Image (tube, helix red, strand yellow):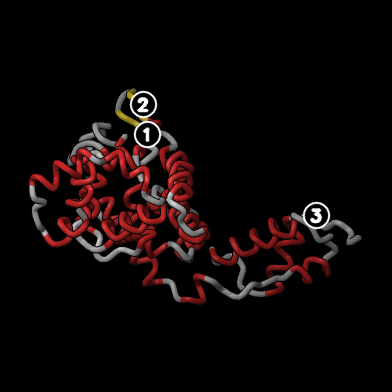
Amino acid sequence: MRFAARLGFTIEPETWDALCAQVESIASVSAERIRDELTLLLTEGGAKCGLRLLDQSGLLQAVLPEVAAMRGVSQEAEFHPEGDVWTHVQLLFDHLDEPSAELAWSALLHDIGKPSTMVRAERIRFHGHDAIGAKMAAVICGRLRMSNEARRVIGTLVADHMRISHVRQMRPSTLVRLLREPHFPELLELHRADCLASHGKLDLYEFCQEQLAALKKEHLRPPALLTGDDLIALGFAPGPLFREILAAVEDAQLEGRLDNYQSALRFVQRKFCAVPAA
């Protein structure tokens, strides 16, 4: 099936019939082997065709029932003229060029939370499908014996795939924190493919690219103005408050409101009440 998808071959009818008749025997195959074969199918090329074959054969339902559940789940035509969630996910792979294993799995699973969160009101909505989907992705990754790192990256991409829709409304410091996250390049690529497989609008993708081009490395991750030792010197006791204070200082720094040590000291003294050190 993987080779048929990648090479554009047609599976001989008798072979196809035998495959479909033996779908249940996939239960005897190790999770690691299933994971590796699926990963190759998703990353070698022809993934859309491969997913269609998985679905038609019954293998998709057998190995990834959560993915099969996306079939027939309606979406708003204004945002998803391509059709249901399963159609959208398949089309998305047409817009990924040699994706990493983590990006490919994230693309497959990014909307997996939609079937269980779908509500019809004035229009179709999927409240919290990103958070629900991340939890479901964690279960699938665990079932397929993925590495801890792969689980972390896939879970993060699924959980965060809606964040880019809010970039224009973000505070400057929040935006910079997002742009500098290690997984952001793959998150942005997922967003691009997600848009091209639906409404086709790339304005937020282009906005992020412009922001990245405009921000120099020192603006994305500037040297810290204060350290824990500085807070102790100000009379603060070590503890959870340190993280809050240092984060507030960095937010102000990223937004251009602080640019040196002295201004950072005054900011902390004005905003926080010092607690005598133990």
Q: Is residue 71 above or below residue 110?
A: above
What residue is at 41 percent from the left and 38 percent from the top? Answer: 129
Q: Depth-wise, is mark 2 or mark 3 nearer the camera?
A: 2
Could you classify mark 2 by the number of other residues whose Cα lies within 10 Å: few (under 14), some (14-19), or many (20 or more)? few
Amino acid type assigned to the residue bearing label 2 in the image:
Val
Amino acid type assigned to the residue bearing label 3 in the image:
Cys
Judging by the rendered image, the residue that carries numbered circle 3 is 273
Could you classify mark 1 by the number of other residues whose Cα lies within 10 Å: few (under 14), some (14-19), or many (20 or more)? some
Amino acid type assigned to the residue bearing label 1 in the image:
Phe
Judging by the rendered image, the residue that carries numbered circle 1 is 126
User: Distance of mark 2 from mark 3, alpha carbons?
Assistant: 46 Å
Image quadrant in which you'd find residue 216: bottom left
Kindly identify which numbered label has been placed on residue 277: none
Kindly identify which numbered label has been placed on residue 119: 2
Q: Given contact means CB atoms under 8 Å apart, are the residues at marks 3 and 1 in contact?
A: no
Q: Depth-wise, is mark 3 or mark 1 nearer the camera?
A: 1
| Residue at disc 3, secondary structure | loop
Q: Which is nearer the N-term, disc 3 or disc 1?
A: 1
Q: Is residue 168 left or right of residue 221?
A: left
Q: Is residue 28 left or right of residue 40?
A: right
In this rendered view, identify the residue nearer to me: 1 or 123: 1
Please provide percent x and percent y for residue 23.
26, 40
| Residue at disc 2, secondary structure | strand
Q: Is residue 256 above or below residue 122?
A: below
In this rendered view, identify the residue nearer to me: 59 or 187: 59
Q: Quadrant of the C terminus?
A: bottom right
Q: Which is nearer the N-term, disc 2 or disc 1?
A: 2
Residue found at the far top of this picture: 121
Q: Given contact means CB atoms under 8 Å apart, are the residues at marks 2 and 1 in contact?
A: yes
